[in-house]
Amino acid sequence: MIQSLFGVGVLLLGTPWMLLLGMTFPATLQLLLPISLTISLLQLSRGHQYVDRVLLRGIATLTLPAIAVALLASTRWSPPLEIFVAILVLTFSLQDRVQLIRRGLNQLLRFERTYIAIMGLVHGASNLGGSMLTALAFGKGLHRDVSRATIAAGYTLFAIVQLTTLRLAGTNWQVDLGTGAGLIVAGATTFWLTERYIFSRFDPRKYRIGLEILLIITGLLLLLSAL
């Protein structure tokens, strides 16, 4: 439901928990990426006209190559990035409350291309780049529809590159086909219910507050998973 509302959630929240349960990083990707991709494509089918194409071009040229390189490297070594991402996400979440943070983030966003490239490295290595994409959309103050559509478009590209890279790397598929199909259907059903009964109730102000809460919860969960 969280990804259906905000464009991000399945990978961001699912990855740390799957790893804590003992799944390998490739198996976690194989389990979660098809679900995330399905929800993102459904979101784009409804809101593709809202995508921030300038930001998406930056993602396509800078983030995607970085994802492929970092994902290939992570099959041999996966760096502990949870604390770094958690601090970054929590900082973004406080920008509406702390003026000093807001000014600092305005300076950071002047180096948006560098941020986007780092986001790709983080996502390829840890599957946590979605939180950085969400934080970027929040920091730029994108409208509710633009934010969700742009995050969904970015996540779609992320998933395609990750699945392609896993395939080219010769990684064995470890998730049962029936289990994967069932989870995809569950994800699609959740999206339909959320779109029909919940999303329309979120005006831009409520949506931004919800996104702020999501970032705070995400940051705290990442810190806990790193302990």
Image (cartoon, rainbow, N blue to C red):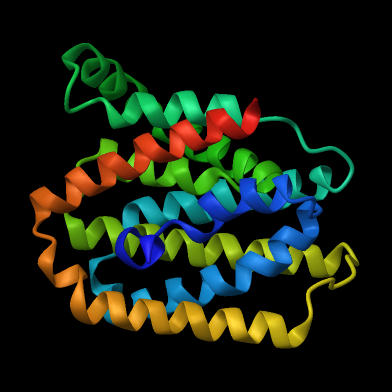
Name the residue: 61% across, 39% down.
122
Residue at the image point whose x is 8% and y is 59% from the top: 203
Please name whichever residue, 60 or 165, is drawn nearer the observer in this view of the structure.
165
Q: On the rendered image, what quadrant is the C terminus found in?
A: top right
**Residue 121 is drawn in which quadrant?**
top right
Query: Is residue 65 in view from this perspective?
Result: no
| Image quarter of residue 79 | top right
- Quarter holding residue 181: bottom right
Q: Looking at the image, is 83 positioned above or below residue 183?
A: above
191 above or below 148? below
Q: Nearer the viewer, residue 128 or 185?
A: 185
Screen quadrant of the N terminus? bottom left
Q: Which x, y percent locates residue 104?
A: 29, 16
Q: Is residue 74 visible?
A: yes
Say whether residue 114 is left or right of residue 176.
left
The location of residue 159, given as percent across then percent down, is 59, 65
- Work out which residue is located at the far top of the displayed protein and give it: 100
Number of numbered markers? 0
Q: Is residue 18 above or below residue 119?
A: below
Residue extending farthest to the front is: 21
Residue 168 in percent (x, y) is at 84, 67
Q: Nearer the viewer, residue 3 or 160?
A: 3
Would residue 138 appear left or right of 9 to someone viewing this image?
A: left
Q: Give the side of residue 85 with respect to residue 78, left or right.
A: left
Residue at 30% in and 63% down: 5
Residue at image x 28%, y 41%?
A: 213
27 with respect to 215 (left or right): right
Compared with residue 213, is residue 61 higher up or lower down, i.e. above or below? below
Residue 71, x across and y down, in percent: 75, 49
